[in-house]
Amino acid sequence: MSYRRFTDRSGQRWEIRDRTHGNWEFRPVHGNPEAPRKGEAPGHQTDPFELSEEELHVVLEDATPTDGGESRGRGDGGLLGGSEKSGGLFDDYERPPKPKSPFLDDR
């Protein structure tokens, strides 16, 4: 799947990922110091390739910054990690020990 890239009004590069139908994630690319953001597709269009750069600027300006957790991959979504930010149901979960290598090279 390809992702739409565009330049915002200040010259920073962004990549748009369609997370769910109508919910987009804006990721900074190529040295853009901004935080990732989440935004809603405009009601008339849910495909970022169908919008002009000017329309994308408006959607980006209305988008809210995220902590970046969504852009790190699927993983466990932060629920099992016990981070101080999560406040989730499984904060006290401890991961089982990593299994030993069958090649005995992990001693």
Image (cartoon, grey):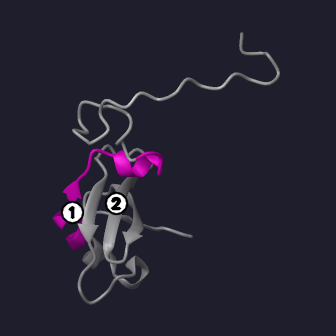
Q: Position of residue 95 (x, y in %)?
A: 47, 29
* Residue carrying label 1: 63
How many C-alpha atoms fall within 10 Å of the one at disc 2: few (<14), some, or many (≥20)?
Answer: many
- In the displayed structure, 92 sits above or below 48; it is above
Q: Residue at x 38, y 77 (%)?
A: 48
- In the displayed structure, 68 sits above or below 60; it is above
Q: Secondary structure at mark 2?
A: strand
Say if the magenta span includes residue 74. yes
Amino acid at the residue labelled 2: Phe
> Are the residues at dot 1 and dot 2 in contact (C-beta closer than 8 Å)?
yes
Q: Position of residue 30 (x, y in %)?
A: 45, 49
Say if the magenta span includes residue 70. yes
In the displayed structure image, the side of residue 64 where residue 50 appears, left or right: right
Q: Which residues are magenta?
A: 57-76
| Residue 39 numbered mark, or none | none
* Residue carrying label 2: 26
In the displayed structure image, the side of residue 4 where residue 11 appears, left or right: left
**Mark 1 → mark 2, Cα distance in angstroms:** 8 Å
Amino acid at the residue labelled 1: Ala
Q: Position of residue 97 (x, y in %)?
A: 55, 23
In the foreground, 45 or 11: 45
Q: Quadrant of the N terminus?
A: bottom right
